Amino acid sequence: MNVNVRKEEYTVLGDFILTSYSRDLVTISTRFPKLGTDFKDEFVAKLNFVKALESGLVLKENQKEATSSLYQEAGELNGELNFVSSYFKDAGLNTALVTDLKNDLFNHNIEGALLKIEGLKQYIVAHLAALVEEGMEEHFPDKLTDHKVSLTAKNNAQNALINDHKELINANVAHYDALYSFIASIAEKGKLVFKGTVYQDEYTISKVMKRMRAAGRKDDNSGAPRS
C-alpha cells in the first residue's frame, strides 16, 4: 500500500479520481486503450466492494459520532478550567497544572489529559478552602472525577472503533492493494495525457490528497475552540 495515503482514505481518493477519470475517459483511453470502459468498470466494482466492506460495520459514522462526543466534552471541560485558572490566580496558586491540562484538551491529547486530571483534582482538594473562598464550587473535585470517568469511556469507545477499522483493513488488505493499483494506474496515465494543462493536478495524487484533507477539515466542526 502507498505509505503517503492513509488506508481509511483509499475510498475517498478513489471517488476523487473516478470523477476526473469518468469525465476524461475518452481522452485517456485514446492514448491508453487498456484504460477504457472495461477498466473503468473493474475500478468502480473494486471501489464499491471496498466501500461495502467499510459500511458493513458502519465504522465511519460511528467513529465520527464517538470523536465528536469526546471532543465536545473535552471542550466543555476546557471552558470550565478557565474559571479554575482564575480562582487559582486569585488564591495565589500556581496555574501550571491547569494550563497543562487545558493544552492537552485543546490538542485532543485525551490520554495525556486523563493523566493530568487526577493530579489537578488532588491539588484542588489540598487547597479547597482557599479556592472555595474565591468562588469555586465545593464539589468541583467530584465534577473532575465525573469528567475523567466519562472521557475515559468515550476515549476507549473511540479507540475500539479505530481498532475495528484496522482489523477490517488488515483482513482485506489484498482488496485495498487492488483498489490502490487502479488509482495509481489512472493517476499515472492521466498525468501523462494532461501534462501542462489545468487537469494535470487532478491526477497528481499528492495534490488530490491535499484537496481531500482540506475538504475534510472544513467539514469537521468537532474540534473544541481554544480559550
Image: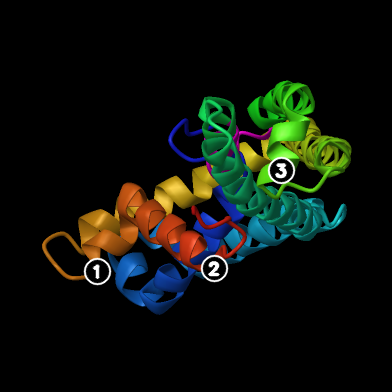
Q: Residues within 10 Å of mark 3 (few under 14, many from 20)?
A: few
State the residue position of label 3. Answer: 133
Residue 168: quarter of image: top right
State the residue position of label 2. Answer: 219
**Nearest the eye: 124 or 166:** 124
Q: Amino acid at mark 1?
A: Tyr
Residues at marks 3 and 1, CA–CA distance in whole angstroms: 66 Å
Whichever of callouts 3 and 2 sits on the residue coming sooner in the sequence is 3
Query: Is residue 54 found left or right of 204 in the rendered image?
Result: right
Residue 92 in percent (x, y) is at 53, 30
Of labels 2 and 1, the one closer to you? 2
- Is disc 3 in contact with disc 2, using a CB cutoff of under 8 Å? no
Q: Residue furthest left?
A: 196
Assign the magenta stretch its main secondary structure: helix
Residue 123 in percent (x, y) is at 71, 23
**Nearest the eye: 210 or 114:** 114
- Quadrant including the N terminus: top right
State the residue position of label 1. Answer: 199
Q: Amino acid at mark 2?
A: Asp
**Nearest the eye: 224 or 77:** 77
Which residues fall within the magenta stretch? 101-110
Label 2 SS = helix
Q: Does residue 57 belong to the magenta stretch?
A: no
